[in-house]
Amino acid sequence: MSFYLYVLAGIAGGILGGMGMGGGTALIPILSVLCGVGQDVAQGVNLLSFLPMSLVALSVHARKGLVKRAEALSFSVPALLTSALFSALAVALPTALLKTAFGGFLILLACFRLKSVLNFQKR
């Protein structure tokens, strides 16, 4: 049964990653909640799977002319620096804190999404 959950996690991550929304939004909860993988391991798997997914998605978006290089570079450098810093921090933090922080992030994301949907329906 766990094989099918891993396949489901890969499909969900691929769908969201391909749309540029971050496959980890689905992949990490599926791996940690449904598959029983530790939060730290789920985050590591997400980072590893992100590399090929992002390369494929980037090439598709670039072929469609949807990538603006100058703008991408202006936020890529700070993103790389802070990701290095916070990945080192994440490794040092307890798994329970990582779970709580990621869960809080997902709740906050859901609230913003719900607000935008409700505002859209008012139009």
Image (cartoon, grey):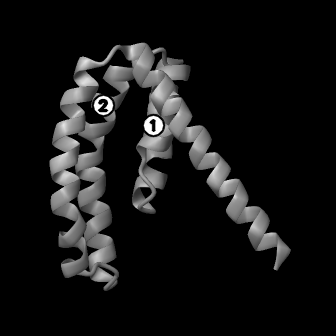
Question: Residue 40: x, y in percent?
Answer: 33, 21
| Residue density around tag 1, few if under 14, some if 14–19, many if 20 or more, within 10 Å | many
Q: Is residue 20 above or below residue 70?
A: above
Give the residue at mark 2: 45
| Residue density around tag 2, few if under 14, some if 14–19, many if 20 or more, within 10 Å | some
Report the residue at 64% width, 56% height from top.
113
Give the residue at mark 1: 27
Please, what secondary structure does the residue beneath circle 1 have?
A: helix
Please, what secondary structure does the residue beneath circle 2 have?
A: helix
Q: Is residue 65 left or right of residue 23?
A: left
Report the residue at 18% width, 71% height from top.
73
Q: Is residue 57 left or right of residue 85?
A: right
- Residue sitting at the far right: 122
Circles 2 and 1: CB atoms closer than 8 Å: yes
Report the residue at 46% width, 29% height from top.
101
Residue 92 disc label: none
Q: Amino acid at mark 2?
A: Val
Question: Residue 24: x, y in percent?
Answer: 42, 41
Asked whether residue 37 is in view, the answer is no
